[in-house]
Image (cartoon, rainbow, N blue to C red):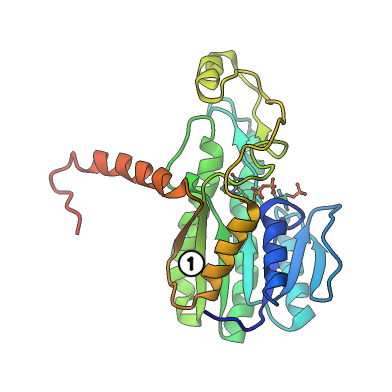
Amino acid sequence: MSSSPQTWMITGAGRGLGRALVEAALDAGHTVVATVRGEHALPDHDRLTVMTLDVRDRVAAHDTVRRAAEWRGRIDVLVNNAGYGLIGAVEEASEEDVRAIMDTNLLGPLWLSQAVIPIMRQQGGGHIVQISTVGAVGTMPMLGLYNSSKWGLEAFSEAMAAEVRRFGIRVSLIEPGALDTAWAGTSMRFSAPSEVYDEQRTELFGTAEVPWPAGESGGGTTPADAAAAVLEHVASEDDRRLRVLVGDDAPAQVAAALDLRRHDYEHDPRFVVG
Ligand SMILES: NC(=O)c1ccc[n+]([C@@H]2O[C@H](COP(=O)([O-])OP(=O)(O)OC[C@H]3O[C@@H](n4cnc5c(N)ncnc54)[C@H](OP(=O)(O)O)[C@@H]3O)[C@@H](O)[C@H]2O)c1
């Protein structure tokens, strides 16, 4: 385990998992650049600086990475955490819905990764941590566009991991199951519903009504526990996994998704594993 202080940059850091990551990184003695979109309640701390960034803005993403690197002379760990979910059948999703979620969940991490790679290469290494999801392995009806955005994140990140390994840059895909944040509540966005999907929405969510009431927290792994798992993974230099499951529910969800794929492929007699 590496315990030497590092400089972390974390997007979407005002609340939820991002905020928990800021707190965990500060507790571990690291220096943190936290990016937020607007108002925030992050604590004052001499090892914390807060910058404003909407990750959809490519020019701003490059500029914020440059300013973050100037602050302490390096960025050791970039965590692409900012993201949100969209409930809507594929048929229901408007062009605006689709472009917005791709801009945030797929292109945001892409711009930030592109901006940080030259800095990490120049300093001789670094670690890009993408907050993905178990929903980047399988899919769920009504979450197809969210799934697509995170599958895309995983695809470019897997290729990128192989490209930047020679520069000493690690890449990780963190795949949480359900987290106890506002993700499924007040943060969730909804496509305009069509009544032809009411029955399916009711089967899945217990109601056809969307947006659903914000309600209480949905349970799941606490942000603090999830953040601790990320910190532990990053600190362990022997842990060379690309994909890291977080949360007790995550392994079963990924196993089910992989079984579904394997089931299809096994119909082809030429398909042999191992
Ligand atoms: N919660 C889950 O069950 C779960 C499971 C698997 C993966 N994840 C992933 O975990 C990550 C963190 O989500 P969370 O659970 O902590 O949800 P959250 O509490 O809703 O936090 C999401 C964060 O992303 C920020 N954000 C959204 N769009 C942004 C944009 N365009 N530019 C900059 N920041 C933006 C939000 O900023 P504002 O405060 O300004 O809105 C907020 O800080 C997301 O990538 C999510 O997909 C969550």
Classify mark 1: helix, strand or loop. Answer: helix
In this view, 17 is above or below 97:
below
Q: Which residue is mark 1?
A: 160
In this view, 75 is above or below 123:
above
Residue under the image location 51 percent in, 51 percent down: 247
- Depth check, front residue: 221 or 170: 221
In this view, 108 is above or below 189:
below
Q: Position of residue 264 (x, y in %)?
A: 26, 39
Residue under the image location 51 percent in, 36 percent down: 144
Q: Position of residue 203 (x, y in %)?
A: 50, 20
Disc 1 within 8 angstroms of ligand 1 (CB): no
- Depth check, front residue: 137 or 69: 137
Picture quadrant of residue 101: top right
- Depth check, front residue: 66 or 45: 45
Picture quadrant of residue 45: bottom right
Tell me the amino acid under the disc marked 1.
Met
